[in-house]
Amino acid sequence: MNNLSDQQKGSLLAFVAVIFITPDSLFIRLSNIDTWGLVFYRGLIPFFLVFLVMLIIYKLSFFRILFTSGHHGLIYVVTFSITNITFVVSIQNTNVANTLVMIATAPMLSALLSAIFLKEPPDKKTLVSIVITFLAIIFIFFDSLKLGNFYGDILGLITALGLAVGAVTIRSAKSKNLVPAAVVGKLFVALFALFFVRSFELSEKDIFIVPLMCTLCVAIPFVLVTIAPRFIPAAEVNLFFLLETIIGPIWVWMIIKEQPSIETIQGGIIIILTIAIHSFLKLKNS
């Protein structure tokens, strides 16, 4: 890693993280545990795994790093906790493709927030992309109103906003290590879910699916995604989530035959093409 440039480090971390995340939606669909029980384990298991690794690496410095992260750490704890909860609840209340299409808007939301808080104003191409993206979201929302999936779609959009806020927060605190804050965020997720859990029992295939999901699709990616924006812009990190938008529904369709609506496919294609073309033009110009 020492021989890589910041661009290469950030891109590699974001790419590996999203590859690990792609089967996450499928695991959520395959699990039989109730929603809040799943949220609880997705907070508790990654918390213990990453906390132990952090203690081995940083020892007691872990707590010093946590407390010196200041308001950036606090903001990241809150946004990280919210996105972890809204993602699972969204998947449980709409099509997987709808949730992932909503999350695909995170780069454009990051660009808007960067303009407001980091004084990095978007260029004309970015502004056009933002307008097209949000028109596509409205199109998908209109379809979801007819199907009764509006609640899940709204939570998917909140997840995207949380990812954008988190990425911009990390970008604005490049000199700080916010992984400890993310660890605390996972603990908060588990504690919040405690108020709503009906059963903690893991039965049959859940005994294998839930721990595997929490390790491969949650614990490992969240560390990588937390580190990546220290090397590349927040919007660029979130662009890698387009891979999840494409691959995630394919996993679900292949295994459990869940098909998104025509409107979701059409809106999703518009969003993905818009962001892909925008990214290509930005890279070409740079």
Image (cartoon, rainbow, N blue to C red):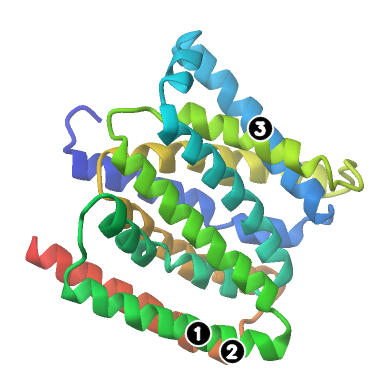
Q: Residue 180, can we see it?
A: yes
Is 154 situated left or right of 8 in this image? Answer: right
Q: Kindly identify the residue that appears in the image at 50 percent across and 54 percent down.
A: 162
Asked if residue 238 lies left or right of residue 45, the reply is left
Residue 254 in sight in this render: no
Q: Which residue is at a point 41% across and 35% down the rendered structure image?
A: 72
Q: Tell which of 74 and 257 is nearer to you.
A: 74
What label sits on residue 142 in the rendered view? 2
3D distance between C-alphas at marks 2 and 3: 36 Å
Q: Alpha-carbon neighbours of circle 3 within 10 Å: few (<14), some, or many (≥20)?
A: many
User: Residue 36 placed where, x, y %?
Assistant: 79, 50
Label 1 – label 3 distance at C-alpha: 34 Å
Tell me where residue 123 sits by quadrant.
Answer: bottom left
Could you tell me which secondary element the residue under label 1 belongs to?
helix
- Label 1 packing within 10 angstroms: few (<14), some (14-19), many (20+): few
> At x 74% / y 41%, what residue is drawn?
192
- Tag 1 residue: 138
Q: Pointer 1 and pointer 2: residues touching (CB < 8 Å)? A: yes
Identify residue for label 3: 187
Q: Position of residue 224 (x, y in %)?
A: 42, 39
Cα separation between marks 1 and 2 = 6 Å
